[in-house]
Every structure is written in structure tokens, then in C-alpha cells.
């Protein structure tokens, strides 16, 4: 089942209501599936990807805890069967277990898996909350 994305108004509230303990990029799963989440962002001259966060139905996870340094954050999510819940067109590397990978090129040659990440425009905010919703919502 393909899912749609809603990442709108909450970002505006995140920038209007500062909170020192607030997560800087939060992934909220508003589906009935468990989501295994990977993220990527451009930092210090290269893409850095990491995962996996396991986010249950109607739960949120803090996936980037410091202020966002990039305007764009890339997100990929799959269900417990390995089917994509959220994907896109940006090719990044992932691994089967927990990972931190620097660089997005030649994933297979480096022993990683190529995944297609969804691009999220954070509009240069310090904080952003991303919502994954089912297509029926």
C-alpha cells in the first residue's frame, strides 16, 4: 500500500514556539503499519545516511536531535516485510542493520543497498516535524 505525505503546518509552529528540549527533525507515523525509518542529509560536503528507527503506529521518533544544517532532509521508510511505505527519487545507501553511511554513490559496490529516499524541504527551519499518513486519510 502506497502512502501519502503530510509535512505542512507543524513546521511553522515548530519555528514559532522555541523549546530547548525540542527535537530538530521528528518523524511521526500516522499509519497502522510499523515504520522502519532511515534519514539522510548533506553535511560537511557529503550525504550522511543513518537508520533504522522503528516507529510504531501513531508514534513519533526524534531522528535528528541537533539543529538542522541542511534545507533538505531525505526520508525512506519500509514496513516489517521490507515493502516501501515512503520512498522517492533520491538514491541513497542503507544497510540491513543499524547503519551510518557517508556518501550516496556506488552503494552496491560498497556492500550497501540502494534505496530511493523522499526529499523533505524544511524551508531552512531549525526544527521540522514530518508526518507519514496512509493514503486513505
Image (cartoon, helix red, strand yellow):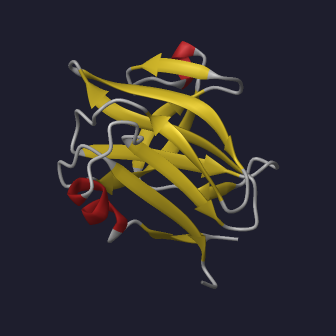
Q: Residue furthest left?
A: 124
Residue 137 at x, y percent in the picture = 60, 84
* Picture residue at 75% right of the left edge, 53% below the top: 34
* Picture residue at 27% right of the left edge, 46% below the top: 72
* Picture residue at 34% right of the left edge, 34% below the top: 41
Q: Residue furthest bottom?
A: 136
**Horizontal arrangement in the rendering, residue 128 relative to residue 93 (left or right):** left
In the foreground, 10 or 110: 10
In the foreground, 52 or 26: 26
Residue 84 at x, y percent in the picture = 65, 55
**Horizontal arrangement in the rendering, residue 86 relative to residue 35 (left or right):** left
> Which quarter of the rendering shows the N terminus?
bottom right
Is 16 drawn above or below residue 4 in the view shown?
above
Query: Within the image, what quadrant is residue 104 found in?
Result: top left
Residue 116 at x, y percent in the picture = 49, 47
In the foreground, 132 or 48: 132
* Picture residue at 26% right of the left edge, 48% below the top: 18
Q: Residue furthest right?
A: 81
In the foreground, 80 or 15: 15
Residue 134 at x, y percent in the picture = 63, 74
**Horizontal arrangement in the rendering, residue 88 relative to residue 68 (left or right):** right
Is 3 drawn above or below residue 76 in the view shown?
below
Amino acid at each position: 500500500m502506497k502512502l501519502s505525505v503530510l509535512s505542512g503546518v507543524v513546521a511553522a509552529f515548530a519555528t514559532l514556539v522555541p523549546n530547548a528540549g525540542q527535537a530538530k527533525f521528528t518523524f511521526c507515523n500516522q499509519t497502522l503499519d510499523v515504520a522502519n525509518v532511515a534519514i539522510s542529509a548533506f553535511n560537511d560536503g557529503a550525504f550522511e545516511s543513518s537508520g533504522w528507527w522503528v516507529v510504531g503506529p501513531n508514534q513519533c521518533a526524534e531522528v535528528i536531535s541537533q539543529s538542522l544544517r541542511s534545507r533538505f532532509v531525505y526520508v525512506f521508510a519500509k514496513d516489517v516485510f521490507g515493502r516501501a511505505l515512503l520512498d522517492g527519487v533520491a538514491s541513497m545507501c542503507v544497510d540491513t542493520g543499524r547503519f551510518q553511511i557517508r556518501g550516496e554513490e556506488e552503494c552496491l559496490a560498497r556492500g550497501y543497498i540502494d534505496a530511493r529516499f523522499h526529499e523533505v524541504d524544511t524551508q531552512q527551519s531549525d526544527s521540522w516535524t514530518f508526518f507519514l499518513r496512509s493514503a486513505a486519510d
